[in-house]
Amino acid sequence: MGNRRRVAERRKTGSAVIGGVIAVVVGGAGLGAYALYGPGASADDGSTSASAGDHKHVKTGPLSATEVQTAATKFLTSWKAGKAAQAAAVTNDPTAATTLLTGYTKDAHITGVTLTPGTRAGDQVPFSVKGTVAYKGTSKPLAYDSSLTVVRDKETGKPLVDWHSSVVHPDLKDGDTLVTGEAGTPPVKAYDRDGGELTTAKYPSLGPVLDGLREKYGKIAGGKAGIELDVVRGKTSQKAKLSDKSLLTLTKGTPGKVKTTLSPTFQAAAERQVAAKDRSSVVVLRPSTGEILAVANHNPGFNTAFQGSLAPGSTMKIVTSTMLFEKGLVKPDQSHPCPKKYKLAGWTFHNDDNSEIKQGTFKLAFGASCNNAFINFAPKLSNSDLTTEAQQVYGLGMNNWAIGVPTFDGSIPVQSGAQMGASLIGQGGVRMNPLNMASVSATVESGVFRQPYLVSPDVDHRTLAKASRTMSSQTQAWLKDVMRYTAGYGTAAKAMSGVSGDAGAKTGSAEVDNQKKPNGWFTAYRGDLAAAGVVQAGGHGGDTAGPIVAALLKMG
């Protein structure tokens, strides 16, 4: 459900049908016995009465079966009769109870309520709820089960219903409300570039994408909102990142239509690839246009490919190399060592497997993904250099991409000391996702940053993000040189075997605290295709994400 108007705090109740389902039975002998208790006397239910200086007696101890049943019956009977204030008076939070119970009729439009108690279990009483949700001439029956717990009030000794919103409906958290009305946004039907409908039945991982398309285009795509009974989340639930939830659909509404850039061929292949690898995600796009051809996640519940925020590891060395080339600090074939250890601001950095390159070129270090060949440039850099390069050339970290659905656009914060050094190899505070890294390879392939997009900007006349400058043709040539070398002879060679034509790649392994295996990254281009993938806690990128990306590039 989309955004919805929040209901008012003050409500008046409507009428409700009263049935004969609930009866209150309180034994007269029990009442008489309670009246006879004196200070400190013991009750036959195990409770005691405490006496204050003013002779006010406050009952304590466990609740009797009669007390539980009596409190539950009073509450349910009053609720059923539409007497919100009377029902709330039997709870330990009358204000909150009155608000929600009043809204049950006024805002949720639930009428004809019957409440049937089940068998008591200690201080808990289950009950079933039946009613009708009626809104603007449309109605549907509603039925569900709930329960309440009776507690003894510490100040008065009275048995009261322990109030929580879940008493009214088990899907409610405290502070949530029930509302019936038009859904916040109309539904949409999304289509691929060839006109085929996109569904989760056909493409299981597209759920978050389709939800995003509804939120973005539901109101402008020609659809009509349906009528729903929904849980509208309060502040506490929102902080816990809980979304509004539909409980009952009265009318489905009329969907609008949205065309995407997704390729049915690539999308189907991407779905197959991630289905076979736990915690994997991948994105494929066209460097010449920025069109997204495929997006897939092994976990269909969250779109890591677009919204993930993960350290990209050594795939970030593409951006770092761009900066080094543009600053004239190194060339691909220039001799540049990669020491086994390198100390920076009190930290000692190591290469993977404690490897080293005593005599070799920068291209060799790039292809071997040797960390210290990059970190040892740190003394020659300012703290903001990498951030500036990523923003100005690759359009990253500006929080201004408008692809048609929600995205995380990368983060390359300005850092100092050892953290700045770690950023050069995609650790520290650097965060990316497969969409970001596919865009990096696409920018290398074309020489120009073109913001990726899933829906053409012509649909809603939105402005796509642009980079403030482009890399030089010399820098582009050098980047392609080192990425081709990596694809042919370096850490990406095994995965890229069989990928023909003009192709380049970069692997990455990002260490994560309290995680035994690193996240494996892989980004590459081939002709007018660029792709990137990650396998969380999978191990080295060449072995995990590499085969996924390479399989998709071979289709181009």
Image (cartoon, rainbow, N blue to C red):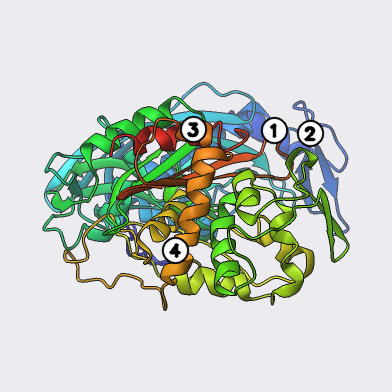
Specify the label residue 63 is tagged with. Answer: 1
**Mark 2 or mark 3, which has the lower sequence index?**
2
Dot in front, 3 or 4: 4
Residue at 64 percent of width and 25 percent of height: 122
Residue 426 makes an appearance in the image = no
Specify the label residue 495 is tagged with. Answer: 3
**Mark 1 or mark 4, which has the lower sequence index?**
1
Residue at 58 percent of width and 62 percent of height: 321
Helix, strand or loop at disc 2? loop
Mark 3 and mark 4: Cα distance apart in space: 23 Å
What amino acid does circle 4 point to?
Gln
**Mark 1 or mark 2, which has the lower sequence index?**
2
Dot in front, 1 or 4: 4
Residue at 70 percent of width and 38 percent of height: 515
Number of residues whose C-alpha sits closer than 10 Å to that of mark 1, classed few (under 14), some (14–19) or many (20 or more): many
Q: Which residue is mark 4?
A: 476
Specify the label residue 472 is tagged with. Answer: none
Number of residues whose C-alpha sits closer than 10 Å to that of mark 2, classed few (under 14), some (14–19) or many (20 or more): some
356 over 34 or under it: above or below: below
Mark 1 and mark 4: Cα distance apart in space: 78 Å
Q: What x and y, as percent, mark residue 253? A: 14, 48
What amino acid does circle 1 point to?
Leu
Front position in the image: 38 or 297: 297
